[in-house]
Amino acid sequence: MPFEKYENASQATRWPVSKAMKQLVVVGTVAIDQVKTPFGERDRVFGGSASYFSYAASFFTPVALVAVVGRDFPPDYRKVLEEKAIDLSHLEVSDGKTFFWRGEYGNDLNTAHTLETQLNVLMDFNPRLKFETLPDFLFLANMDPALQLSVLDQVKGAKLKYVACDTMNFWIENKREDLLRVLKRVHCVVLNDGEARQLTGESNLIRAAAKMREMGPNHIVIKKGEHGALVFFEGHFFALPAYPLESVFDPTGAGDSFAGGLMGCLAAAGEVSLETMKSAVAMGSIVASFTVEDFGLERLRRLARAELDERLEIFRRVCSF
Amino acid sequence: MPFEKYENASQATRWPVSKAMKQLVVVGTVAIDQVKTPFGERDRVFGGSASYFSYAASFFTPVALVAVVGRDFPPDYRKVLEEKAIDLSHLEVSDGKTFFWRGEYGNDLNTAHTLETQLNVLMDFNPRLKFETLPDFLFLANMDPALQLSVLDQVKGAKLKYVACDTMNFWIENKREDLLRVLKRVHCVVLNDGEARQLTGESNLIRAAAKMREMGPNHIVIKKGEHGALVFFEGHFFALPAYPLESVFDPTGAGDSFAGGLMGCLAAAGEVSLETMKSAVAMGSIVASFTVEDFGLERLRRLARAELDERLEIFRRVCSF
């Protein structure tokens, strides 16, 4: 399905469609989570890397979601995604149950403790990109690097404007070779500080970033949770604190929302420069700062674009000297 | 001794003396350290909170150092302080040995492990402020809160423009009542994130800062090591990442240099506003970023004011979006 539909949809959801705006596709997971934080516990939260990513990105640009769910996937969850300009025609429905994750956070809200993972339909997932026109911006959310490679093979030869990926400790440890192959073929990697250290064996993040650049990507975005983010953009460097929050309710999806805001803004700008990257990272932080204020996508669902802009303005004042 | 002398000294060391520039006094420790980091080990390093503070502050304003050393204090160390516009006429020399600290850093350079402390002449130290004119800016560096209180008693009734203090985990645990009395009587407290959490029992730093404001100080500066600093200034908030460093050699004195740069800039500006505070915190971070590049005061001794300004400019670009 071509993206034109979403230019119409966009009018309904009232984000501006600029001519420069480029198509954005995310490949990742859609999940049902069970989450416990120091502030509460919730069963059957709508989660998954691609869900958070696409909902966050849709504040800025139309986005197509490539993922798989099981027959049990609740229609209500689909409706959540339909609230925004998210193309769901590439959301596969397979026999079996939707991917399930159960996790817990202690007082250190920066670290999720995975208690249970049921891959379910993810076991046989093989993402297929069936677009009439290939997108300009592609995000490979956290998933098996073998699947990320399979997606990259499908766009081989096509001149994609910008491809970024995420990953996690499990793949760094168990699928390192595949992951290194992925890194060779992306423009940008988005990962957290612990993952950056684990991947490179460097405790200093500037040296870790230099090592990652040697692995392939020209742009490195290191997420540090409540401590903000570091961005290495070719020869340039950019550091940002996190937007200060008095109450972090549930950190799940913060990283994926950050990446969604980031890629959404880049795609909306239509080009990747130091300046668009800076603004995009700042806006990514702002989207994430809303995500963590409630379980799942709840806060983003109540979020108006004007709130994002307002908080971004406060953030700018908070950081400038 | 009046400060006029330092206006002359300032011409030699080439910092500009503005009419607004106010006198700055620090009360704290002068020490001989033994330091081990992952990058090396050194015996008899010139250290102490007031040494780092005053050397850092002297890049911006004349500073008077109130502290005590033993008869063993090496003349060469005194000469180090004499390189700058630091008034040493309040540096007491007592019978006994100079305060000694031995510490070690592991790969986590944010945390110092104290292996040995010999208080020596600090045991009987009772700082006395004997100034013809009381200073406008006073910093109570990390030391027993009972001594900090004694200093505050000596300036009772005098309208000091700005009084700030530092502290550490040991005093929070063992001298809490005295510390709370100090906090009631200062404008600003400068401490690290772990100390802020310990003092308030709040893991969220924004809530911790709110609790500290209820304890007295209107301004709270929380140092987060490699993650930067948070500043709570009356109703305002300010967050800064750390200046990105590829090699941190020895973190000893980073916090004291930060405070020295901060207070030095405020005193040089002659007034404390949100704007002067922002610039002062940024410059404090920059001074600290140089301190950690070598053992003790070695890097600061080789440091030109122009290097500070240059790195501050880079820092501004690194943080702005």
Image (spheres, coloured by chain):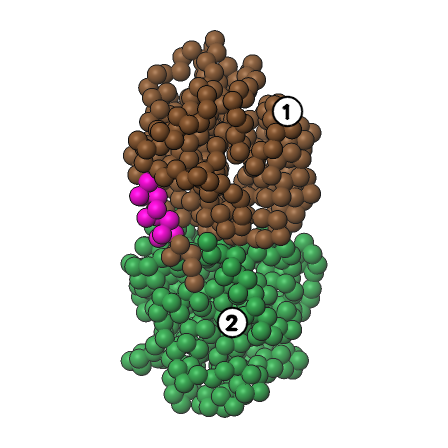
Chain colours: A green, B brown
Q: Is residue A293 visible?
A: yes
Task: Identify which residue is drawn at 48% across, 79% down.
Answer: A61
Q: Nearer the viewer, residue A139 or B146?
A: B146
Q: Using residue A133 as the reference point, say whether residue A48 is left or right of it.
A: right
Residue A314 vertical position relative to residue B140 in the rendered view, above or below: below
Chain letter of disc 2?
A: A
| Residue drawn at point x = 40 percent, y = 90 percent | A132
Q: Amino acid at mark 1?
A: Asp
At horizontal 46% and vertical 43% (from top left) the residue drawn is B269
Which dot marks residue B153?
1
Residue B97, position as x, y percentages in the image: 45, 13
Q: Where is residue B268 shown, x and y percent of the image? A: 44, 39
Element carrying mark 2: helix
Question: How many numbered marks have been drawn onto this rendered protein structure?
Answer: 2
In the picture, residue A281 is in which quadrant? bottom left
Q: Residue at x 46, y 21 (%)?
A: B1
Residue type at mark 2 is: Phe
Q: Residues within 10 Å of mark 2 (few under 14, many from 20)?
A: many
Distance between the alpha carbons at the discs numbered 2 and 1 = 58 Å
> B24 above or below A259?
above
User: Is A116 or B164 nearer to us in this picture?
Assistant: B164
In the image shown, does A39 or B193 lie closer to the viewer? B193
**Secondary element type, mark 1:** helix
From this view, report whether residue A74 is shown above or below residue B302.
below
Residue range corresponding to the magenta coloring: B305-315
Q: Chain of mark 1?
A: B
> Picture coordinates of residue B86 (x, y %)?
40, 27
- Most common SS among magenta residues: helix
**Left or right: where does residue A101 sit relative to residue A22?**
right
Q: Specify the label residue A53 is tagged with.
A: 2
